[in-house]
Image (cartoon, rainbow, N blue to C red):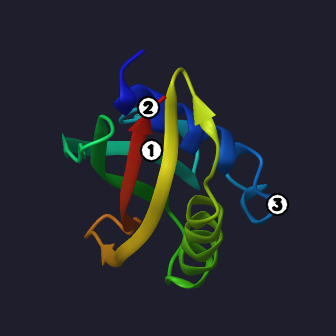
Amino acid sequence: MSASLAVQSLIVAALRGAPGLATLTGVFDGVAPDAIAPYLTVGADSMADWSHQTGTGHEHAVRLALWDDRPGTARVKVLAAAAETAVRALAGSRDATRIAGVAFVRTVFVKDPGGWTQAAIDFRIRTEQL
């Protein structure tokens, strides 16, 4: 399994198990056109080399997109905070990829003309190959 897919799997597991995200209707791997709000998608992401003298490593730039169709931004802001907490606590390993560190970068809240709100939550996650 690639390091990117391992990180994605760890993120999805953390989000699905987070108590503050119980109201989400799903955590998806891409656009979910038939999903009922609120829901979250994992990606876009990119991966760069973070190798060092003693091993191979990667730095992942990961974006979570949280979608809500309610007026206002209160619910999406509460859910975004819970998602941030869950990913910040990410630890462990999967398929020979170990989480070495997680850094929250930013959250941007955007309202579209159709009434939907999106929270784009960005992280930098560093991993090491075991």
Q: What x and y, as percent, mark residue 4?
A: 35, 32
x, y (%) of residue 40? Answer: 51, 49
Residue at 45% x, 44% y is: 41
Residue designated by label 1:
41
- Quadrant for the N terminus, please: top left
Residue under pointer 3: 19
Specify the label residue 29 is tagged with.
2
Tell whether label 1 touches label 2 (CB within 8 Å). yes
Q: Secondary structure at mark 2?
A: loop
Identified by mark 1, the residue type is Thr
Three-letter code, disc 2: Asp
Q: Residue at x 42, y 69 (%)?
A: 103
Does residue 130 appear to the left or right of 25 in the view shown? left
The Cα–Cα distance between marks 2 and 3, rounded to whole angstroms, is 20 Å
Is 35 situated above or below 117? above
Q: Which residue shows up at 41% across the image and 27% down it?
A: 5
